[in-house]
Image (tube, helix red, strand yellow):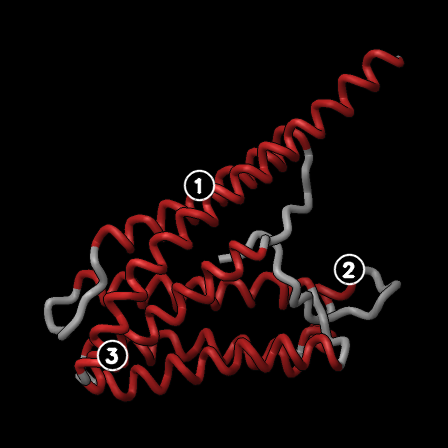
């Protein structure tokens, strides 16, 4: 759930970005391999969930989360950043989250499901952020809209909530069920707050851009 991801896995500084994209060897890095592995885990996760193998689904989800942690760490430590990685990494994260939330909201074969109001809020928030970022880029040429601490907190909370929901279906302990109910509400509040924060920051960028344009028009 990111407008601009910090894990730009790939080309060394000073290299031509276009040539970096076209050169397959420059993209064959450890972080990108881990990201591709995470994408491959998504259908495996869905298959295990649909078959009712929730323990396997939980292990696959945690494994995907670990690859997300390690690919970012390796990309920063080894300076293996690339434009391809910047596209694949959030795509892999979002694909897992979308599949997980949709399945555990609408499936009739799970012990604990996501409440519809939470899934609706998560999806609407992402849609509004993407739409607003698109308008900022196309209307006023704002090309950089980095994630805020509220957005990062929201993403982490949503992922933890999904993991806890899978764990409830895998282990069925009452404590996990109670924890999931708390996380549902916490995720809702943090998601709403992060949506407001993104819109507030976007409005500030618009006003700042329009102010500079007006100042140039007056001096010109």
Of 118 and 132, nearer the camera is 118
Residue carrying label 1 = 128
Of 201 and 74, nearer the camera is 201
Query: Is tag 2's residue or tag 1's residue first in the polypeptide sequence?
Result: 2
What residue is at 43 percent from the left and 49 percent from the top?
A: 126
Q: Which of marks 2 and 3 is in front?
A: 3
Query: In x, y percent, where is residue 200?
Result: 55, 37
Residue carrying label 3 = 176
Q: In this view, does 52 lie to the left or right of 125?
A: left
Residue carrying label 2 = 17
Location of the C terminus (image quadrant): top right
Query: In x, y percent, where is residue 171?
Result: 21, 87
What residue is at 37 percent from the left and 52 percent from the top?
A: 189
Q: Marks 2/3: CA distance?
A: 47 Å
Image quarter for residue 41?
A: bottom left
Q: Residues within 10 Å of mark 1 (few under 14, many from 20)?
A: some
Q: Is residue 215 above or below residue 54?
A: above
Query: Is tag 3's residue or tag 1's residue first in the polypeptide sequence?
Result: 1
Q: In this view, does 139 lie above or below 111?
A: above
Q: In this view, does 122 lie to the left or right of 52?
A: right
């Amino acid at each position: 759930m990111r407008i601009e991801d910090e894990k730009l896995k790939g080309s060394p500084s000073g290299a031509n970005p276009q040539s970096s994209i076209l050169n397959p060897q420059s993209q064959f890095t450890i972080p990108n391999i881990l990201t591709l592995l995470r994408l491959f885990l998504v259908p495996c996760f869905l298959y295990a969930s649909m078959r009712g193998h929730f323990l396997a689904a939980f292990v696959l989800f945690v494994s995907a989360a670990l690859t997300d942690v390690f690919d970012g760490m390796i990309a920063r430590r080894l300076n293996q950043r690339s434009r391809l990685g910047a596209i694949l990494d959030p795509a892999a994260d979002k694909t897992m989250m979308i599949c997980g939330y949709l399945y555990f909201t609408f499936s009739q074969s799970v012990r604990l499901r996501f409440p519809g109001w939470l899934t609706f809020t998560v999806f609407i928030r992402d849609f509004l952020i993407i739409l607003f970022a698109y308008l900022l880029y196309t209307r006023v040429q704002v090309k950089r809209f980095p994630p805020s601490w509220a957005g990062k907190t929201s993403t982490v909370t949503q992922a933890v909530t999904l993991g806890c929901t899978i764990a409830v279906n895998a282990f069925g302990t009452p404590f996990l069920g109670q924890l999931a109910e708390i996380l549902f509400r916490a995720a809702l509040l943090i998601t709403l707050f992060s949506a407001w924060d993104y819109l507030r920051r976007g409005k500030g960028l618009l006003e700042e851009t329009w102010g500079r344009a007006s100042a140039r028009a007056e001096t010109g």
